[in-house]
Image (spheres, rainbow, N blue to C red):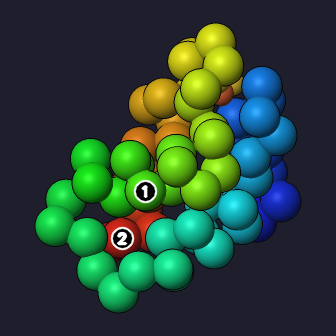
Amino acid sequence: MENKIICNCMQVSVADIEKALHEHERFENVEKAFDEVQTITHCSTGCGTCHSKVLDVISELMA
Ligand code: FES
């Protein structure tokens, strides 16, 4: 699960998203967290089809 690639274009895994999230204490909402994760990992900047998958992973990690 950890090494599962969520964004194929940018080769971003669950672990990469988790690491990016942990750079901050807490996010107000999933969108804010997504912006930050995207800035750090560049996930979802290619074809964009992973967008909802990335959001799902973030919500799960924030839960
Ligand atoms: S799979 Fe993430 S941008 Fe294409």
8 is higher (above) or lower (below) than 39: above
Q: Which mark is residue 36?
A: 1
Q: Residue furthest bottom?
A: 25
> In what quadrant of the picture does the N terminus appear?
bottom right
**Residue 49 placement: quadrant:** top right
Q: CA distance from mark 2 to mark 1?
A: 13 Å
Q: Is residue 28 left or right of residue 35?
A: left
Along the line of sight, the residue nearer the viewer: 5 or 33: 33
Q: Which mark is residue 62?
A: 2
Most extreme residue toward the left, as rendered?
28
Mark 2 crowd level (few <14, some 14–19, many ≥20, 10 Å Cα): some
* Three-letter code, disc 1: Glu
Q: Nearer the viewer, mark 2 or mark 1?
A: 1
Badge 2 or badge 1: first in the primary sequence: 1
Viewer-nearest residue: 44 or 61: 44
Number of numbered callouts drawn: 2
Residue depicted at 52% across the width and 49% down the height:
39
Mark number for residue 52? none
Reply above or below: 27 against 29: below
Q: Position of residue 9 (x, y in %)?
A: 77, 25
Q: Residue drawn 59% across and 26% down?
A: 45
Inspect the image, locate mark 2, and give the three-letter code of the amino acid beneath it: Met
Question: Residue visible at 35% across and 58% down?
Answer: 33
* Quadrant of the rendering where the C terminus is positioned: bottom left
Density class for disc 1 (Cα within 10 Å; few <14, some 14-19, many ≥20) is some
- Measured as percent of width and height from the top left, residue 53 is found at 52, 36
4 is higher (above) or lower (below) than 18: above
- Secondary structure beneath label 1: helix
Q: Ligand 1 shows up in which quadrant of the image?
A: top right
**Left or right placement of residue 26 versus residue 34 in this view:** left
